[in-house]
Amino acid sequence: MLVRIKSTDMKTTTPTPQKVTIDYHDSALFDLFVTELKDVYWAEKYIVKNLPKMAEAATSEDLKELLNAHLDETQNQVERLEEIFQLIDKRAVGKRCDGMDGLIEESRTIIDKTEDGTLTRDVGLIASAQKIEHYEIATYGTLKTIAAVLDLDDQIIDLLTETLEEEKEVDQKLTQLAESHINEDAREEEN
């Protein structure tokens, strides 16, 4: 006996594709992410320690205010980094950042080699602060990109983005301050 099967009697199912979740916590790239996080954590804490000295050495009230306001932001950035450490289940511990150590040392040298109460010192402090900001911008941009590649929690990327945008904003404010009057006024100062 021959049985005919109608095509409507046969049901075919296509397997539903499932998202494959890969845990990158054991990858070399994740290890690099953690190392860079420790590096910038140390750097931010070092900046918190040294920004008041830079603000105190500034001549312009505008520069003093900007550096002091950024001190408050930097303290918040340290807290954000601590939150990121929690989110990746790592202890918040810094790793000495030779780059930031050098940039802070450069700001100390500017303070030592310029006359107190001059706008020439402020020009030097602004240049030093912008070098620090550029270092941070590069670091946070890199961390944000690595976090995205590793498919880390969106909250981590958001925290890094928030800090990155703050650093860019401070850099712009420093430029505006220098260009508004400090650079021009410093040109008039004598040796």
Image (cartoon, rainbow, N blue to C red):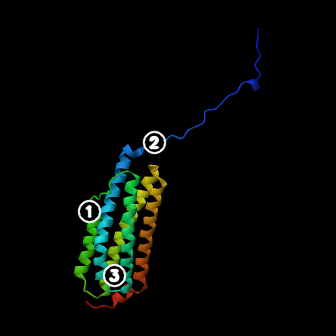
Q: CA distance from mark 1 to mark 3?
A: 24 Å
Residue 36 at what x, y percent from top left? 34, 56
Task: Please indicate whether residue 174 sits to the left or right of residue 104 in the image.
Answer: right
Q: Amino acid at mark 3?
A: Val
Task: Please indicate whether residue 149 sits to the left or right of residue 96 in the image.
Answer: right
- Local packing at callout 1 (Cα closer than 10 Å; few below 14, some 14-19, many 20+) is few
Residue at 30%, 62% (x, y): give it. Answer: 42
Q: Secondary structure at mark 2?
A: loop
Instruction: Tell which circle, 2 or 3, labels the residue nearer the N-terminal end.
Output: 2
Instruction: Tell which circle, 1 or 3, labels the residue nearer the N-terminal end.
Output: 1
For label 3, the residue is 123
Residue at 31%, 85% (x, y): give it. Answer: 120
Which quadrant of the figure has residue 145?
bottom left
Residue 107 at what x, y percent from top left? 27, 75
Instruction: Give 177 or 23, whichever is nearer the viewer.
Output: 23
Residue at 25%, 80% (x, y): give it. Answer: 111
Q: Nearer the viewer, mark 2 or mark 3?
A: 2
Q: Secondary structure at mark 3?
A: helix
Q: Nearer the viewer, mark 1 or mark 3?
A: 1
For label 2, the residue is 22
For label 1, the residue is 98
Image quadrant where one finds the C terminus: bottom left
Instruction: Tell which circle, 2 or 1, labels the residue nearer the N-terminal end.
Output: 2
Residue at 36%, 69% (x, y): give it. Answer: 75
